[in-house]
Amino acid sequence: VLLSPSFLPRLRQLSAHFLTTTASSSSLFLRRTTTSTMAAPAYASELQIAQLAVQRASILTKRVFHEKAKGTVDKNDKSPVTIGDFGAQALIIAALQHHFPEDAIVAEEEAAQLREDANLKQTIWDLVSSTKLDDPAAEELLGGPIKDIDSMLELIDRGNSLGGSSGRIWTIDPIDGTKGFLRGGQYAVCLGLMVDADVKVGVLGCPNLPIDDAARLTADIGANATDEGRGVLFSAVQGHGATSRALTAGALAAEKPIAMRAIDDLSKATFCESVEAGHSAHDDQALISKKLGITEPSVRMDSQAKYGSIARGAGDIYLRLPVKATYQEKIWDHAAGDLIVREAGGQVTDIHGKRLDFGVGRTLANNKGVIAAPAAVHDKVLQVVKEVLGAKQA
Ligand SMILES: Nc1ncnc2c1ncn2[C@@H]1O[C@H](COP(=O)(O)OS(=O)(=O)O)[C@@H](OP(=O)(O)O)[C@H]1O
Ligand SMILES: [Mg+2]
Ligand SMILES: [Mg+2]
Ligand SMILES: [Mg+2]
């Protein structure tokens, strides 16, 4: 039984519990916990695989980021998708499939367009098949390379789950902030695990954010910026706090706990919002900020890098007020960020004060907009949001 093929994934899953990385070395070490009865930390294996999978996918997105031609195609909804989005999704799902083959996956992209375009498919395959972690043990832990081009397409389409309120469901945004990615700004590789609709693990790879948690919040990475001093991996496990570490190309770097800034005077707060005016209502957000007494201009930044930034105290408030009443936010745009902010001492709700409900499908159909702020001041921010939006409707 132990050596039967069906047992292998479970065996890998178990062994991952006993694998841990060390900051001082670029390789993974097998480290046994002291007694066999000692419980592994909650979701330790899921966290480690998620972090390494996001790191590996980030290597691929960085390669594409530095290319002038990013292989952009338009999706049905006219939003852009690049070879980086498809490639990163394939690599993340390959690692999840290797370790947790029974789990459902809700991912943003699908392979339909690639099946019809041989060149596009080949370009992505060239990229995917030549991207690996530079630490052999870590790469092997993720299951190594994808077998062939057809397997790659199948893996991309494994992300087609409809989601729901029960069981284990991963959610992936292979490149969040694709428009920022194309503009040369911030973007994030996002992965979350929900169990019965509750986010248990959240990981965000932000290749263009400064490694330094104390760096001033800025969306601008500067023309001709290099990767020097950039690249952060944010993580959280429910009930275990949030951390940041340098994003590497191999084994995991040493982690540091992160926390939101304690702000007693809201006028000193910094708030961040989307770059695209079509994604959140800049005018309403400006009014709210003014009513809160905030004097600093907002920092406009693409992607869930906003959640990571406020979680480490580089900013304080993230407002995402709806532009269109009909738009439903996607679960992959929020799951990891929601957990990371809450584990860092924040609160995240919609504009009605409801927690984000990840259990109703691929979208946040029960929510409108997002307000993320330090727990102590969230109510005050919510109150002002309600005043401003209420006055508009009156
Ligand atoms: N109309 C509308 N309203 C709200 N949100 C929308 C809308 N259209 C798209 N999207 C989603 O926005 C995701 C990017 O969010 P950002 O916060 O990065 O926006 S912005 O680019 O900075 O403006 C973006 O994620 P990616 O597609 O992964 O980039 C979309 O899922
Ligand atoms: Mg998109
Ligand atoms: Mg997104
Ligand atoms: Mg995306």
Image (spheres, rainbow, N blue to C red):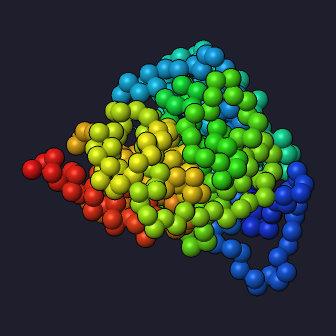
Q: Quadrant of the N terminus?
A: bottom right
Considering only vertical position in the picture, is 364 above or below 118? below
- Tell me if I can see residue 159 in this picture: no
For ligand 1, give the image quadrant.
top left
Considering only vertical position in the picture, is 13 above or below 71? below
Q: Position of residue 166 (x, y in %)?
A: 42, 64
Q: Nearest the camera: 64 or 31?
A: 64
The part of the image, by quadrant, that contains residue 124 is top right
Considering only vertical position in the picture, is 163 above or below 180? below
Extreme-left residue of the structure: 394
- Tell me if I can see residue 231 in this picture: yes
Q: Position of residue 98 (x, y in %)?
A: 68, 51
Classify residue 53 as left or right of residue 286. right
Classify residue 323 as left or right of residue 6. left
Q: Nearest the camera: 245 or 117?
A: 245
Q: Position of residue 229 (x, y in %)?
A: 75, 41
Classify residue 15 as left or right of residue 370. right
Considering only vertical position in the picture, is 34 above or below 88? below
Q: Nearest the camera: 188 or 391?
A: 391
Q: Residue at x 79, y 54 (%)?
A: 253
Total numbered circles: 0
The part of the image, by quadrant, that contains residue 360 is bottom left
Classify residue 60 as left or right of residue 356. right
Q: Residue at x 37, y 47 (%)?
A: 320
The part of the image, by quadrant, that contains residue 347 is bottom left
Q: Residue at x 55, y 37 (%)?
A: 219
Q: Residue at x 85, y 60 (%)?
A: 22
Q: Position of residue 123 (x, y in %)?
A: 65, 20
